[in-house]
Amino acid sequence: MQLIALSTIVISGCLVLYFALRRLVKVEHARVCRQIDAHAQAFLARGEELQREMEKLQAKVAGNITVANRELQSQASRHAELPQEIAPETLAAITEALTCLFGKKVRVLSAAPIAASAATREQPIFWTHQGRMHIHASHEVVQRGF
C-alpha cells in the first residue's frame, strides 16, 4: 500500500511539473513572439524610412543631372560661338611673340581657340599634362619600387 501511495505521489508530482512547465513554455513562447513582432515592425518602419530617403535622393540626383545637362548645353553653345579660325593678324601677333621669346624666327603651323572655361577647370587639359610629362622626362625622374 505504501508503494501505491508513493507511486501516486510521484505521478502526481510529475503531472503538476508537466502542466507548470507547459504553462511556462506557453508564456515564454508568447513573449518571444511579441519581441519578434516588435522587431519586425521596427524593421519595416526603417525600411519605409529608407525608401522615402532613397526617393528624396533620387529626386535630388535627377535635379543635379538636369542642372548638369543644362550646363553642358550652355558650354556647348559657348564653344560653338568660338571662331573656328584665327584671324591672320592674331596669328602674326602669336608668331612675333614666339619669335621674341625664343630669340629666332619661328613659324606657327597651327593655332586653335581654347574656351576660357577650359583653362579654369580642375582637370588638367591635354597640353598641360604633356608639359608635365616633358618636364618629368627631362629631369630623368626615376620611379623606385619598394
Image (cartoon, rainbow, N blue to C red):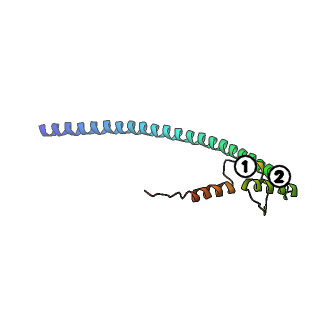
Name the quadrant containing residue 13: top left
Which amino acid, mark 2? Ser
Count neighbours of disc 2 (C-alpha within 10 A) and say few if under 14, some if 14 to 19, many if 20 or more: few
Name the one closer to the observer, 17 or 81: 81
Which amino acid, mark 1? Ala
Measuring from the top left, give residue 137's x and y in whole percent.
Answer: 58, 59
Residue 77 shows which numbered tag? 2
Name the one closer to the observer, 35 or 5: 35
Compared across the picture, whether 118 is left or right of 50 comes to right
Measuring from the top left, give residue 132's x and y in whole percent.
Answer: 62, 55
Q: In percent of the image, x 75 and y 48: which residue is there?
A: 117
Determine whether the residue tagged by mark 1 lies in a helix, strand or loop: helix
Q: In percent of the image, x 70 and y 48: which residue is there?
A: 121
Label 1 – label 2 distance at C-alpha: 17 Å
Name the one closer to the observer, 48 or 22: 48
- Label 1 belongs to which residue? 119
Measuring from the top left, give residue 52's x and y in whole percent.
Answer: 64, 41
Measuring from the top left, give residue 4's x and y in whole percent.
Answer: 16, 40
Q: Can you say whether 50 is above or below 98 in the image?
A: above
